[in-house]
Image: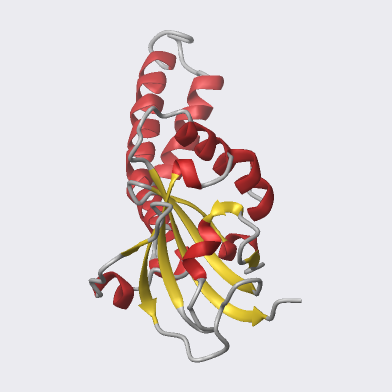
Amino acid sequence: MAPAVLLVTCVTALLHPTGPARGVTTVEPARRALLAIGGSLLLSARPRQAVARASLETPEVRGLDTPEAQQVVKRFTKLATGVRFAELKQGTGAEVGAGSTAVCQWVLRRADGYFVDSSEKHNFAPVRLTIGAHELGTLDDALVGIRAGGVRRVLVPLAQAGTAAQISGKLELEFGPSRQLARQFNRPDPDNVFIYELQVDKVQPAV
């Protein structure tokens, strides 16, 4: 008998016991069977849940961290602020410079690599970062010199990341990701960083 059919049968027996030992000999075995079947269904669902969760962490869904990018080992460039960046892909379009605005697809992770949010989750709505405006701390400093079409991975120390409210507002984060950020800012760890991957779609010249 299929588990779903057996489950319905057990529920029916539990709610509508029959026979001379009504409420005792029929209900108790049915209750035990119901618990056993329910437990087996929960166990059988776990692999599917694990697969579903894993699919949310695939590079395609996360956005910019492709398998090719993961295999490329790059030397990080460290800025005076402590922000570090590595080139994952060279762009060929217009170059980002002082005062210009980089229109970027983005992925945000915690220092342990745990996915927080991405522009893919927001229908690929880009973030606009004007160089020198420091709307997300000093993140924009790490974009100087990149060309449209390029991708950089940027490690931003919390002291240079702005505030949780600024990040949540600029990236339009929902409640869950915003809570993750708040918890990171509350951690007493001077080495804690946020990891961004930024793909520059377009460069708008300085006004």
* Residue 169 in picture, x, y percent from top left: 68, 48
On the question of residue 49 being in view, the answer is yes
Extreme residue in the right direction: 207
Extreme residue in the bottom direction: 92
When the figure is inspected, residue 189 is found, relative to residue 58, above or below; the finding is: above
Q: Quadrant of residue 165?
A: top right
> Left or right: where does residue 127 sit relative to residue 77?
right
When the figure is inspected, residue 68 is found, relative to residue 176, above or below; the finding is: below
> Left or right: where does residue 82 sit relative to residue 73?
right
Q: Quadrant of the C terminus?
A: bottom right
Q: Quadrant of residue 36?
A: top left
Closer to the camera in the image, 119 or 41? 119
Closer to the camera in the image, 116 or 139? 139
Q: Residue at x 64, y 68 (%)?
A: 126
* Residue 142 in picture, x, y percent from top left: 47, 65
On the question of residue 1 being in view, the answer is no
* Residue 17 in picture, x, y percent from top left: 51, 18
